[in-house]
Amino acid sequence: MAIDLVEVRDNTSALHDEFIVHRLGLVPLKCPEDRANKHHIDAMQFTEDCDCPSMCEKCAVKFSLKSACGEEVREVTSKDIKIDGQYQLEEDPLAPVAYFKDEAMEDEAPILLMKLAKG
């Protein structure tokens, strides 16, 4: 799965909306292993094949990304992408991929989307 449709509400960064949207589309998403989970890739439908008038839980998962810079430079990463609404309640929700080091199994740095500076 990948991020396909993005609505930018307020972008005051130096980067154009299209650049940010492109970067978000490149972030890989992991799907829960449990096939009974309603957001497993096999249970999802393409938006154009779904019978709903808009996007529903059968054909879409909603995420949000909110970030602001304080006094210093702030790195906005894939860990800032949060699942929205009812999807938060799931035990293992669809989420950006977390990369691990082979031997230590510690989290590596997430995918950098942009850097924000004061102002």
Image: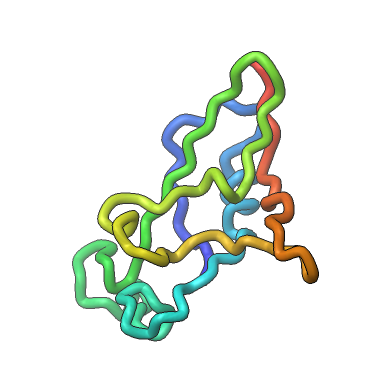
- 91 to 32, vertically: above or below: above
- 10 to 56, vertically: above or below: above
Residue 11, position in %: x, y? 52, 31
Where, by quadrant of the figure, is residue 5 drawn? bottom left
Question: How many numbered dots are placed on residues in this image?
Answer: 0
Give left or right: position of 4 versus 84: right
Foreground pick, 30 / 14: 30
Q: Residue at x 41, y 66 (%)?
A: 92
- 15 to 100, vertically: above or below: above
Residue 76, position in %: x, y? 63, 38
Residue 45, position in %: x, y? 35, 79
Q: Residue at x 70, y 33 (%)?
A: 115
Foreground pick, 76 / 34: 34
Q: Point out the image quarter for the C terminus.
A: top right
Q: In the rendered image, is residue 119 in sight?
A: no
Residue 62, position in %: x, y? 37, 56
Q: Residue furthest front?
A: 104
Foreground pick, 86 / 23: 86
Q: Residue at x 48, y 36 (%)?
A: 66
Give left or right: position of 29 versus 91: right
Q: Residue at x 46, y 30 (%)?
A: 10
Where, by quadrant of the figure, is residue 64 drawn? top left
Q: In the rendered image, is residue 79 in sight?
A: yes
Q: How is the image coloured?
A: rainbow
Foreground pick, 102 / 118: 102
- 117 to 113, vertically: above or below: above
